[in-house]
Image (cartoon, rainbow, N blue to C red):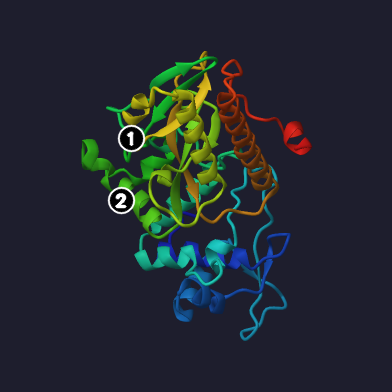
């Protein structure tokens, strides 16, 4: 689709996605047409009709026998069952309640490659507990001058201080289409990073801080955290509560060595067993509008188990310290243990 000849690449791809969003479970028959393009993504009917004609000309769409001028109906080719599909949520076209649809915002930006970047990112999402883009593809890094620091050890556990920075990194074949070949060095990637920033500005992309069990890019995710715990916030969620519980447990472990905690003002504090390697905090690139698929539901269940499991672990650690017990290492509660609570 990105290589086909068209008068307006952005309208061409957006129109196809709108027609696709109007299909049923077979992803073939759709009654959505130029009117839906105008309603959802803001492409006027004359431009949408031209894009539909281009789609028909390229064999991506065909009119059904029941199609009429006043009640158009189109058929898309059957899906290739051997292909690796990209699951795009319909809500990026229709919008979440009371919000401008993401694809309409992209059309307002007027950059076809921004749409391509969004589609590529949806295709890269991993269905693990983070439900985000792999770290080796796109990530937010801790500051190089402020790596994870072990503040103290107390019995079977150690307290680590971590800070999430603002620097971002990316790699992979998906980035190459955004590279400006006539430029060199960082300038060659200026358009790429501007598009990443634009996706964040329009609310399509965000970076969620996660604690990983090491600094390798294939390290295992432990749990998400909320750096805003150090600020007065009215609305909190389970991630905020977990981050505060982990912080409070770390403070309890410090005991009369509170001066060590004072040296890590503003940092995220977590406790891990003393044998554990240095953890790392990274921002996981996530799409704000997520598809309701079996993979997403499994990932959400894993996420909740990790949050609840570590919430129980840090509450238990704090209770242990209050009773003078320091010999039990931090261990997240298992699924069975959570069910028994």
Determine which quarter of the picture holds residue 340: top right
Residue bearing mark 2: 194
Of helix, strand and loop, which one carries label 2?
helix
Residue bearing mark 1: 265
Of helix, strand and loop, which one carries label 1?
loop
Residue at 77% over, 38% down: 339
Q: Is residue 164 left or right of residue 99?
A: left
Quick check: can you spot residue 57?
Answer: no
Residue at 29% over, 49% down: 191
User: How would you rate the neighbour count of disc 2 (Cα within 10 Å): few for under 14, some for 14-19, many for 20 or more?
Assistant: few
Determine which quarter of the picture holds residue 108: bottom left
Of 181 and 278, nearer the camera is 278
69 lies above or below 301 = below
Q: Assign the C terminus to one quadrant of the image.
A: top right
Marks 1/2: CA–CA distance: 32 Å
Residue at 55% over, 15% down: 156
């Amino acid at each position: 689709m990105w290589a086909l000849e068209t008068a307006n690449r952005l309208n061409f791809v957006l129109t196809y996605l709108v027609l696709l969003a109007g299909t049923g479970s077979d992803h073939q028959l759709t009654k959505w047409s130029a009117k839906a393009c105008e309603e959802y993504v803001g492409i006027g009917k004359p431009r949408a009709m031209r894009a539909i004609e281009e789609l028909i000309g390229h064999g991506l769409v065909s009119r059904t026998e029941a199609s009429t001028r006043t009640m158009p109906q189109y058929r898309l080719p059957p899906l290739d069952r051997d292909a690796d599909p990209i699951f795009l949520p319909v809500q990026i076209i229709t919008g979440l309640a009371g919000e401008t649809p993401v694809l309409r915002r992209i059309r307002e930006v007027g950059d076809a490659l921004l749409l391509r970047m969004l589609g590529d990112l949806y295709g890269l999402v991993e269905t693990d507990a983070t439900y985000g883009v792999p770290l080796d593809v796109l990530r937010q890094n801790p500051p190089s001058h402020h790596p994870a620091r072990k503040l103290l050890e107390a019995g079977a556990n150690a307290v680590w201080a971590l800070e999430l920075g603002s620097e971002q990194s990316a790699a992979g074949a998906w980035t190459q289409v955004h590279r400006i070949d006539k430029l060199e060095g960082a300038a060659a990637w200026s358009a790429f990073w501007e598009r990443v920033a634009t996706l964040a500005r329009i609310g399509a992309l965000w970076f969620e801080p996660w604690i990983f069990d090491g600094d390798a890019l294939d390290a295992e995710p432990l749990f998400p955290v909320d750096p805003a715990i150090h600020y007065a916030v009215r609305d909190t969620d389970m991630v905020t509560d977990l981050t505060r519980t982990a912080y409070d447990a770390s403070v309890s472990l410090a005991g009369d060595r509170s001066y060590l905690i004072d040296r890590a003002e503003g940092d995220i504090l977590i406790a891990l067993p003393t044998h554990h390697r240095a953890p790392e905090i990274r921002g996981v690139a996530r799409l704000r509008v997520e598809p309701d698929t079996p993979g997403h539901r499994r990932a959400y269940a894993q996420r909740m188990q990790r949050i609840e499991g570590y919430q129980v672990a840090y509450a238990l650690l704090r209770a242990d310290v209050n009773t003078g017990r320091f010999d039990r290492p931090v261990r997240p509660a298992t699924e069975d243990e959570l069910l028994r609570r």
